[in-house]
């Protein structure tokens, strides 16, 4: 796959430039060239964490992680689609994937995510979450990568660098993450904790449309880099 991805695609480069120029999102990319296979061959699973009865963490404003996760995956999907990169989302509504709410719903929800990833044939999985900690001073976006997987680690490292340069509070280093969504299939993947809803200042950022755009754009840049920015 990587041999194919290394081939320069001038057309994709110009498409990429056009996306940057016309999207109105003029955050700088640190690299200036792109190599890739035809974009139509590329596919990413975007996984908005939680859903339905499982709201995930909750901020002091009452906002649930579930809803911010979906807002951000929708923004990333738009950016990727503009580049011609296919997206499969594990959920597109506020509902969970567990069917009827009953005992064992969380595992049913996760197994359904696994099925979607496997059937997608995607190149990678990007799972979006919000963090929470008892100490409200904890803050900063951080990326976790599939354990013992070099491809996922490289993706996470590069994307974390984009975060550190361009996002308030972002952590400096990514970490290995033993999460089911990352280990349930062979597909390379990362789980992004976008920030802490337990930190009122960071919660303000995370619920703002402007910051969600900024965050989505950095994630988009990291994915594009995975597909061949050098
Ligand atoms: Zn979560």
Image (cartoon, rainbow, N blue to C red):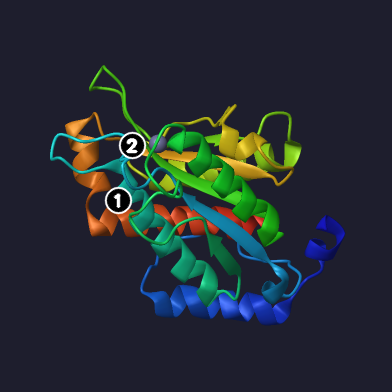
Q: Nearer the viewer, residue 20 or 126?
A: 126
Q: Which residue is mark 1?
A: 67
Residue density around tag 2, few if under 14, some if 14–19, many if 20 or more, within 10 Å:
some
* Location of ligand 1 given as a quarter of the image: top left
Q: Position of residue 143 (x, y in %)?
A: 51, 37
Q: Position of residue 14 (x, y in %)?
A: 61, 80
Q: Quadrant of residue 15?
A: bottom right
Residue farthest toward the left in the current orientation of the protein:
61
Q: Which residue is mark 2?
A: 56
Asked whether mark 2 and ligand 1 are closer than 8 Å, the reply comes as: yes
Q: Which residue is rendered at x = 37% and y = 55% of the image?
A: 70
Q: Position of residue 141 (x, y in %)?
A: 40, 37
Under tag 2, what secondary structure? loop
> Can residue 1 be seen at all in this image of the molecule?
yes
Q: Which residue is rendered at x = 84% and y = 64% of the image?
A: 4
Q: Left or right: where does residue 161 sit relative to residue 59?
A: right
The mark that comes first in sequence, 2 or 1, is 2
| Distance from Cα at disc 2 to Cα at disc 1 | 9 Å
Asked whether mark 1 and ligand 1 are closer than 8 Å, the reply comes as: no
Q: Nearer the viewer, residue 117 or 215?
A: 117
> Can residue 230 be seen at all in this image of the molecule?
no
Q: Quadrant of the N terminus?
A: bottom right
Q: Left or right: where does residue 177 sit relative to residue 75?
A: right
Q: Quadrant of the C terminus?
A: bottom right
Q: Left or right: where does residue 131 sit relative to residue 157?
A: left
Q: Residue 113, relative to residue 34: is it above or below?
A: above
Under tag 1, what secondary structure? helix
Q: Quadrant of residue 31?
A: bottom right
């Amino acid at each position: 796959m990587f041999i194919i991805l290394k081939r320069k695609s001038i057309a994709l480069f110009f498409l990429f430039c056009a996306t940057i120029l016309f999207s109105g999102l003029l955050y700088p990319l640190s690299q200036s060239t792109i190599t890739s296979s035809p974009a139509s061959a590329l596919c990413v699973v975007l996984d908005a964490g939680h859903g339905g009865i499982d709201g995930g963490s909750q901020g002091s404003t009452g906002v649930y992680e579930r809803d911010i996760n979906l807002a951000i995956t929708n923004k990333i999907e738009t950016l990727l689609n503009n580049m011609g990169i296919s997206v499969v989302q594990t959920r597109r509504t506020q509902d969970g994937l567990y069917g009827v709410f009953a005992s064992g719903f969380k595992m049913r929800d996760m197994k359904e995510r696994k099925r979607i990833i496997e059937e997608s044939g995607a190149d990678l999985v990007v799972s979006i979450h919000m963090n929470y900690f008892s100490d409200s001073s904890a803050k900063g976006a951080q990326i976790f990568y599939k354990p013992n997987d070099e491809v996922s680690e490289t993706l996470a490292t590069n994307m974390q660098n984009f975060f550190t340069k361009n996002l308030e509070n972002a952590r400096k280093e990514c970490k290995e993450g033993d999460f089911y969504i990352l280990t349930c299939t062979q597909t390379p993947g990362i789980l992004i904790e976008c920030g802490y809803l337990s930190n009122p200042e960071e919660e303000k950022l995370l619920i703002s449309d402007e910051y969600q755009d900024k965050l989505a754009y950095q994630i988009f840049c990291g994915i594009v880099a995975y597909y061949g920015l050098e």
